[in-house]
Image (spheres, rainbow, N blue to C red):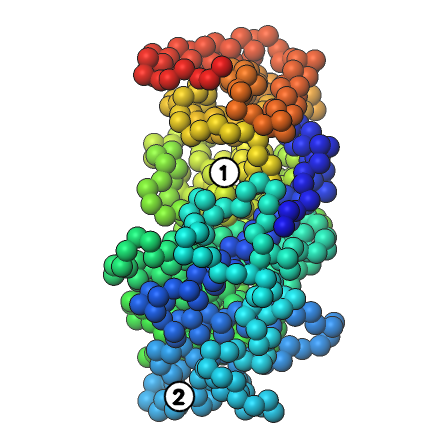
Amino acid sequence: MIRPGVSDRALVELGRTEGTRETLALLVRDQDTRRLLLLRAVLDAAEAADPALCSPAQKARLRADWALLAEADRPRPPGTAHRRAAVPPDPRGTPHSPPGAPHPAPGTAHPRSPTTYLPPGTAHPSSAAPPFPPGTVHPSASASYPPPDTFQRSSEAPRFPPDAPHPSSAAAHLPPGAVHPSSAAAHLPPEAVHPSSVASHGGSGAVLSPARARLFHPLTGPWALSCLHGLDDRGGPPDEHRTRRLRQDLAHFSAIAAVAAARAGIAFTVRLTAHAGVLTLPSLGSLRTAASGDVPVDVSHREGRLTVRQPDAPDVVVHLESAIGAWSGALAWTPVHALPGLTSSTGPMSLDDVDPYRAAPGPRHRTLGGPATLDDGDCKRWLQAWAGTEAALRTGGAHRVSEAVALLRCLVPLERPPGAEGRDSCSATRHEAFGALLSSTPQDALALAETLVHELHHAKLAALGDLVRLHHADARPRYFAPWKTDPRPYDGLLQGVYSHLALADYYQRRALRTAPPDSEYAWSRHARYRAQVGAALPALVGSPDLTVRGRRFVDEMAATYERMADRPAPRNHTARAQAYVRAARDLWTQRHAPALPRPKE
């Protein structure tokens, strides 16, 4: 099935580094749909996995977690309460009781729980329905897996055949403009374009169910990809490290479902697992357990309050905030931080320094710092910078505020890069975590606004590339980019030119709207970024690898660059910028040109 394509009008808007609300919503809706398909790929891969890789008990727990998510996705009339949801217990044991108390027998109610633990295949005692056969889910959700008319129809979603590319591979990413054939029910309705409820910030004015708000959270994407890599059996028998990581990944789905259910107001009790002595409830916070290692933890929810029970330790009571995070009087609890809405009409913004999937696995680039854990001073600096970011963005055009509201869902703090001084910082986006911005603590509002413009254009272009094939160039690094010391592949050059073009536009508009010394600084930045774009743009425009639509897009970028000449920067700024680019090109040529293949002509 083919999704509606990107119109020429939308392509032109994006080529100008702009985008109406409708165009940005198209990008967001497509990314959300792909997130649901990625989750479905995880569930299919788990069901098809060898029992040595994913045990029957783990598969049963995934089905139970999906049932809880399905319940959290059901619409509720205003003023009505969600009924209790019974979730089968963790097969590794029964709930822990307070110290000295006897453990309940398997399948019986926990002494202090409002709900009942059920072994797979039994009916809820409060239900008149007959027992269900092993492997099915509780009737609190649809008995099919996944439930119909919720996220996706299971009858329309064939498992990946043995000879097909595994979903975790690059080949399994959906081609531009296409959607997996299993997705007939996965297309989100127009009113569910983007999370804008208090639980999930966005700018569309729509409110998603707690389940979708949780699944569309940016950091759910890296978790799902990690699951798929662990479930890929083409690498041979799993080793101990891979098995342990997969176990942790699959267990995290239980935490995702629990958070969604709590946000939906469902009363439940589930068993979760704290890994390395830390239990993470995504978007709420984390609890450091009394014992180290992997610790079973029972989590109950009732009326906005979570009760966390662990062996040989007092219960911890956690209260849900109305928007992001949760608070507790326990010193072992660390909440997810929340910043005010970017504008007065948007919800709070998550500043997440606890999610275990916030950092990309493997070695990171030398210019990037690792994931940061914030102290009070860091939080204050983030708040001070964030408080002025809307105003700083607006000086570069109201559309810069609109695109941040539409695309940004959470902030992930990073450590400053090694050797950083002054205003030096680092930032990044991740394709699999659409909507997340990773950044070191910004120096001020202007620095954060610049980071947003830069990184959100990487996100915009990546999302557009999922819908439209812009070029057929290979990945060999061969092109000069003034902002990098090493050669870039064509796609990397396109990404860099696009984000730098947006920055040149932003600073030109700011320079025209502000007075000295702000305008002088803005002109210097505009001149630098425009000179960098001018040095790299010919390689983009002249490439024979552009598709028809890719050429339309790149030509609009070139036209935007040329229109900036109508209001040029002062000559002193332009001269310094051009000298900088010439020096960068000379140094790059000395280092790399003799060993590089010539670009295509």
C-alpha distance separating marks 2 and 1: 52 Å
Q: Is residue 236 visible?
A: yes
Give the quadrant of residue 454: top right
Q: Mark 2 points at which residue?
A: 106
**Residue 92: x, y in percent?**
34, 78
**Residue 317: x, y in percent?**
48, 74
Q: Is residue 200 visible?
A: no
Measuring 58% from the left and 27% from the top, which residue is drawn there?
547
Circle 2 or circle 1, nearest the eye? 2
Please tell me which residue lies in front, 558 or 532. 558
Q: How crowded is mark 2: few (under 14 residues within 10 Å), some or many (20 or more)?
A: some
Residue 393 in the image: above or below residue 354: above
Measuring 62% from the left and 26% from the top, which residue is drawn there?
548
Give the quadrant of residue 597: top left
**Residue 442: mark:** 1
Measuring 47% from the left and 78% from the top, which residue is drawn there?
135
Which amino acid is tagged 2?
A: Pro
Measuring 46% from the left and 17% from the top, which residue is drawn there?
600
Which amino acid is tagged 1?
A: Pro
